[in-house]
Amino acid sequence: MKVRDNLEVIQNQIADVCKKAGRDPEEIKIIAVTKYVSPERAQEAIDAGVIHLGENREEGLLHKIDHLEDKPVWHFIGTLQTRKVKNIIEHVTYIHSLDRLSLAKEINKRSDSKVRCLIQVNASGEESKHGLRPDDVTGFVHELKQYPNIEVSGLMTMAPFTEDEQVIRDCFRTMKKLQAEIQSLQLENAPCDELSMGMSNDFKIAVEEGSTMVRIGTALVGNESEVQ
């Protein structure tokens, strides 16, 4: 299907969920995850009206930037190695995978202004997933005050890939509660307005539970064979 058609379906689904949850659909940023598609398909997403694009790898990000006609709002959503910060920092608006002080230190060093970072949280406790334990997040936020170019714009997580809706919902509720705890601290470096949670298989639950950013790949742009 065309990205434009997929986007319309997703927007309608989000609007339906927001109506039931008493939310404004305008609060939700749809991030097209372009890891498994060509620059041409990514450009199709932009042409369809997608503003936010997300990449998991440095190579994919730089390749898309070199070939796209337009400049979207870029989100780096994958695990970020400290040594690669210098290559991506000037291109991205959001980094979704801040999970350690060494990475914060490098981001702070490489940027001339505040970088919008989301702390990656392993809300499900799965060993296969990256991120801080929920109990460690508040202390981490306090430690980040030593880096003036780091803004804790929000939190990010990935729910377990399961058909058990309650497990997914509990994961997202943990994140919403954690966000509220951080916001209650009223720290200048941590407005924590964003919750990046929900992907192709669970974004409707995520929106219902308070997500402000949904990271959608397959359902929006598909999964092409020619991986860049």
Image: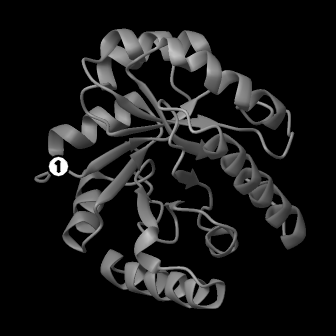
Residue 156, relative to residue 117: is it above or below?
Answer: below
Render colour scheme: one colour
- Of the 4 image quadrants, the one containing the C terminus is top left
> In front: 225, or 130?
130
Q: Position of residue 130 (x, y in %)?
A: 71, 32
Left or right of 79? Residue 69 is left
Q: Label 1: few (<14), some or many (≥20) within 10 Å?
A: some
Q: Amino acid at mark 1?
A: Lys
- Give the vertical position of 94 relative to 216 (above or below): above
Q: For the N terminus, which image quadrant?
A: bottom left
**Left or right position of 155 against 115:** right
- Image coordinates for residue 9, horizontal then vertical, percent: 46, 86
Read off the residue under disc 1.
Answer: 71
Q: Residue at x 24, y 74 (%)?
A: 48
SS for dot 1: loop
In the shown orientation, is residue 70 left or right of residue 168?
left
Q: Residue at x 85, y 40 (%)?
A: 126
The vertical placement of 123 against 202, above or below, is above
